[in-house]
Amino acid sequence: MPPNPVHDAIVFLTKGGYLAAGNRSFIVAYWVLLAVAAVGALAAWRRDRGQRSTRALGLLALRVLTGTMWWEQSLWKIPPHFGGLIYWMKEEVAHAAVPLQATLVRVVVLPNIGTFGPLVYAIEALIGVSLIIGLFTRLGAILGTLMALNLWLGLYSAPGEWPWTYFFLITIMGLYCIDPPGRVLGWDALRRRAGAGRIGILG
């Protein structure tokens, strides 16, 4: 049977797929994140009549899906194995749109992958967690925008890559910076209610 998104989604949700390398703790963690997201969404639904709409449910679904993408992509960067990450960083060295970026990756990042590898993993996992549960989503979106910008410029001319893919990701994360999605059926909505709407850069 050829791969299809429904089958891949079921495998990811039940087994973690190849990205989790058989480590079920990561798929358990993902289900915990979904549970936390559901609790926050239900609490926001009950406390704010303005959040009881099909629009809010749609925004919730899109936020969780976007967060799931970031969470899934962090799984092939789990320390201490950075094979996939090193490969794509070498692609950035060869194909970056900005020579300075290629030089920094070659001279600074790759020789110190033991430091930068865990940092990249932590940032992408944090973005995923933020969006899935709807907490600190403006901060998560800012980090996501920066990561997507790095990918867009770094892989701009890489063979087989479509630069617009990363540009659309920048667009999505940019929209989330402007309008943090956790304010709709998320924990940011509860924080705004408790803090009279003043939560600034965090969401």
Image (cartoon, rainbow, N blue to C red):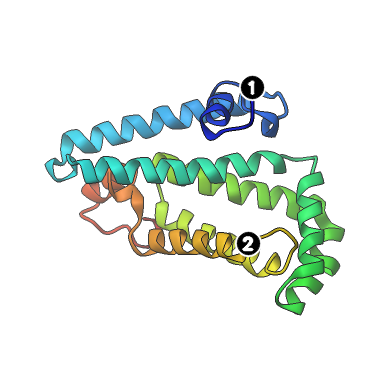
Q: Residue at x 64, y 22 (%)?
A: 24
Q: Residue at x 60, y 51 (%)?
A: 123
Q: Mark 2 points at which residue?
A: 162
Dividing the picture into quadrants, the one containing residue 96 is: bottom right
Q: Circle 2 sits in a helix, a strand or a loop, which is it?
A: loop
Along the viewing direction, whichever of 193 and 42 lies nearer the viewer: 42
Provide residue 174's location: percent of width, then percent of height.
Answer: 44, 64
Q: Residue at x 25, y 44 (%)?
A: 56
Provide residue 87's location: percent of width, then percent of height.
Answer: 81, 53
**Callout count:** 2
Q: Name the residue under label 1.
A: 24
Q: Which residue is drawn at 68% across and 34% down?
A: 19
Provide residue 175's location: percent of width, then percent of height.
Answer: 39, 62
Q: Circle 1 sits in a helix, a strand or a loop, which is it?
A: helix
The amino acid type, in three-letter code, at marker 2 is Trp
The amino acid type, in three-letter code, at marker 1 is Arg
Provide residue 66's location: percent of width, then percent of height.
Answer: 47, 46
From this view, report whether residue 94 is shown above or below residue 13: below
Distance from label 2 to label 1 (Cα)? 32 Å
Circle nearer the viewer, 2 or 1:
2
For this orientation, the residue located farthest to the front is 1
From this view, report whether residue 64 is shown above or below residue 14: below
For marks 2 and 1, the one nearer the N-term is 1
Dividing the picture into quadrants, the one containing residue 113 is: bottom right
